[in-house]
């Protein structure tokens, strides 16, 4: 079982490279049980959106 | 409700200090924030034995840090911070067993913030706080949409290093936004 520390690493890496099937499954399992990491996932997506928007403004 | 053993509190002190240092960058401010946290914890009667003591303390600390940040001037930092020690940030955010020290709380309607000029100020300031290499990797990835491969080449690092930098950047940015924007409503 992944802990949050490792799960957040995977979540971050999923923004930069494709995950293997095994990694995806492990990540999803953890996310099902962890609200903190679910929030982190949403917040990652938001930060990416904000950065993209800022880069358009600059 | 349970009363807390002051000695138990002290055992969390170094962890709290590490977290406060990361956010405040100033040893005496960090000390103050941690002291205020421990005092508040001892005086509080709201700790329930069901939640983790560490998590609860970090929650109080975050509020104290927010207070300090609010009292401080709003000028952006003039110095670019030095590259941080390897796992400093990650160690401060997670407990020894790998779980969050303070799990991310819900950000209420974040999209709305994108229309707020003050939010963009904060966002930019948070980006400026990152150590140099972390900031560069993050800029290249998120602002210039460069691939990991290209970033590695630019910075002269391995892809593993690259992912570490990007992960640190995202963790740091999240903490900064949580402290200075989304968490202020709590």
Image: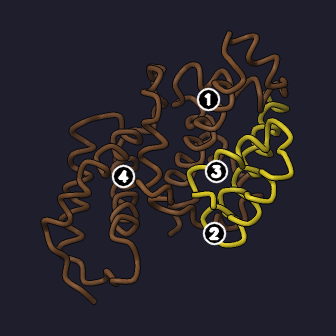
Chain colours: A yellow, B brown
Question: What SS does tag 4 mark?
Answer: helix
Q: Do the residues bearing badges 3 and 1 touch, measured as CB atoms within 8 Å?
A: no
Label 3 Cα crowd, 10 Å radius (few <14 / some 14-19 / many 20+): many
Residue B89 at x, y percent in the picture = 46, 40
Does label 4 lie on the same chain as label 3?
no
Q: CA distance from mark 2 to mark 3?
A: 11 Å
Residue under mark 2: which chain is it in?
A
**Quadrant, the N terminus of chain B:** bottom left
Q: Is residue B14 above or below residue B75?
A: below
Q: Earlier in the sequence, mark 2 or mark 3?
A: 3
Question: On the image, which quarter does residue B18 sit in?
Answer: top left
Q: Chain of mark 1?
A: B
Check whether the beta carbons of the residues at disc 1 and disc 2 lie within 8 A of each other: no
Q: Which residue is mark 4?
A: B65
Where is residue A50? Give x, y as percent.
76, 44
Which label is found at residue A34?
2
**Are dots 2 and 3 on a single chain?**
yes
**Mark 1 sits on what residue?**
B165
Distance from label 3 to label 4 (Cα)?
24 Å
| Image point (39%, 47%), residue name | B69
Please, which residue is most extreme toward the bottom here? Answer: B1
Q: CA distance from mark 1 to mark 2?
A: 24 Å
Which residue position holds label 3?
A: A8
């Amino acid at each position: 079982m992944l802990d949050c520390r490792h799960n957040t690493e995977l979540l971050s890496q999923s923004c930069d490279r494709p995950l293997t099937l095994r990694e995806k499954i492990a990540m999803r399992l953890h996310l099902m049980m962890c609200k903190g990491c679910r929030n982190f996932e949403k917040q990652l997506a938001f930060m990416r959106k904000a950065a993209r928007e800022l880069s358009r403004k600059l | 409700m349970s009363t807390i053993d002051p000695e138990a509190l002290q055992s969390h002190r170094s962890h709290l200090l590490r977290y406060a240092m990361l956010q405040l960058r100033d040893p005496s401010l960090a000390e103050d924030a941690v002291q205020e946290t421990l005092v508040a914890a001892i005086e509080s009667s709201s700790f329930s034995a069901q939640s983790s003591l560490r998590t609860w303390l970090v929650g109080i600390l975050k509020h104290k840090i927010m207070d300090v940040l609010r009292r401080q001037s709003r000028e952006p930092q003039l110095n670019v911070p030095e590259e941080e020690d390897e796992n400093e940030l990650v160690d401060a955010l997670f407990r020894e067993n790998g779980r969050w020290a303070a799990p991310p709380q819900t950000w209420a309607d974040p999209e709305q913030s994108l229309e707020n000029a003050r939010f963009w100020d904060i966002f930019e300031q948070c980006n400026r706080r990152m150590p140099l290499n972390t900031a560069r990797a993050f800029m290249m990835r998120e602002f210039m949409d460069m691939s990991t491969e290209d970033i590695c080449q630019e910075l002269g690092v391995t892809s593993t290093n690259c992912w570490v930098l990007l992960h640190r950047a995202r963790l740091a940015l999240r903490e900064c936004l949580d402290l200075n924007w989304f968490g202020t409503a709590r």
